[in-house]
Amino acid sequence: MKKRQLGASDLFVSEIGFGCMSLGTNEAEAIRILHAALDQGINFFDTADLYDYGLNEEFVGKALKDKRENVILATKVGNRWTEEKNGWSWDPSKAYIKEEVKESLRRLRTDYIDLYQLHGGTIEDNIDETIEAFDELKQEGLIRHYGISSIRPNVIRAYAARSHIVSVLMEYSILNRRPEELFPFLEEQRISVIARGPLAKGLLTDNHTGKLAKTKEKGYLSYNHEELSDIIRAVKEAVNRPLGETALQYSLHHPVVASVIPGASSVEQLTQNIQTGTLLTDEEYHRIQAITKQDVYTAHR
C-alpha cells in the first residue's frame, strides 16, 4: 500500500485508509475487519468519540493495541453526549476538548493520538480558544498533530490562517466535487485533504443498482435520479475499469489528497475497497470532470 505525507506533518498515511464509522456494534466482527485492514496494508484509521458513543473507539483500541507503532490513529472531538446518550450538543471549548481527549486515549488504549480532529465547527465558535486547546495538547505530547473535519470554506480558511492544522477531512467524490475549489489554497498552505465518502454511499460501485433506486425521490446532492443514471453510465463508458476503482482513483488523483477513507462493514467490502488498480491518466481524470458537475459551496463563505 502506497503512503502519502499528511500535510506538513511527519505522518505518512496509506492512500486507502479506513473510515471506522461503518464498523457497527458487533465487537468480534469489527475486530476481524480491522485486523484484515492491517493485513492488507492499511495503516490509517479514522474514528471519533461520537461513533456509537465511544464504542467505536473501544473496538479500534482493542484491535490495534498490539500494532500501535505501525498505525496512525485519528479521532475527533467536539460533540458532547447527553447524559442519557440519546443525542449530543456542540462544544468546541478548550475545557471540553482537554477533558475529552483523556477519554479517547483511554478507549483507544494508547497514550497519544496521531491526528486529533475538530468534528465540525462554525465561524461563530471561539476559534482561538479551540486552537489553543489543540496546541496545548500537542505540547503536552497527548497528540502529535491536529486537523479539522469540515466542509465550510470560511471555517477552513480561518483555521488555515490561524492554526497549525495539517489536514481537512471532508466528503469528496466524483459526485461531490465541491471541495475541489479549495484544493489550490490547501496545497499552497501544505494542508492535506482526507476524503470521506469516495464511493458516494455505494452509488459509485458496481453493485450500485439498489442504491440508485433509492435516489428516485430525493436524488443525491444536486443530482436527480435520471442525471445519476446517465452519469454513472457515462463514467463507466469513459474509463474501462470497475466503477469503485475509478471512484477511488479519481479522489486520489490530486496530490493534495493524502488518503481516502471508505468504510466497510465486512471483510469482503474492505477487500473491494483496496483494489484501487493503477492511477487514472490525466485524460481519464479530465474526461470524468467533463461528465460531472463542478458545484461549489454556496453557504459558509
Image (cartoon, rainbow, N blue to C red):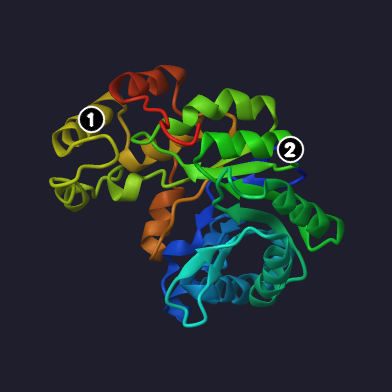
Which three-letter amino acid code belongs to the residue tagged 1? Ile
Q: Give the number of the disc on residue 222.
A: none
Relative placement, left or right, of 49 versus 200 is right
Q: Which residue is drawn at 73% across and 71% down?
A: 110
* Vertical relation: 25 (above or below) 289: below
Q: How far across and down, in percent of the image, does residue 128 sit? A: 73, 47
Give the image location of residue 116, x and y in percent: 67, 56
Front residue of 269/142: it is 142
Look at mark 1 in the image and give the residue it sits on.
Answer: 231
Which residue is at a point 29% across and 40% down the rendered structure image?
A: 221
Q: Position of residue 184 (x, y in %)?
A: 59, 23
Circle 1/circle 2 CB separation < 8 Å: no
Which residue occupies 63% across, 58% down?
Answer: 92
**Quadrant of residue 159 in the image?**
top right
At label 2, counting other C-alpha atoms closer than 10 Å, the crowd grade (few under 14, some 14-19, many 20 or more) is few
Q: Are there few (<14), some (14-19), or many (20+) residues within 10 Å of tag 1?
A: some
* Mark 1 and mark 2: Cα distance apart in space: 40 Å
Label 2 secondary element:
helix
Give the x, y percent position of residue 39. 56, 62
Residue located beneath label 2 in the image: 162
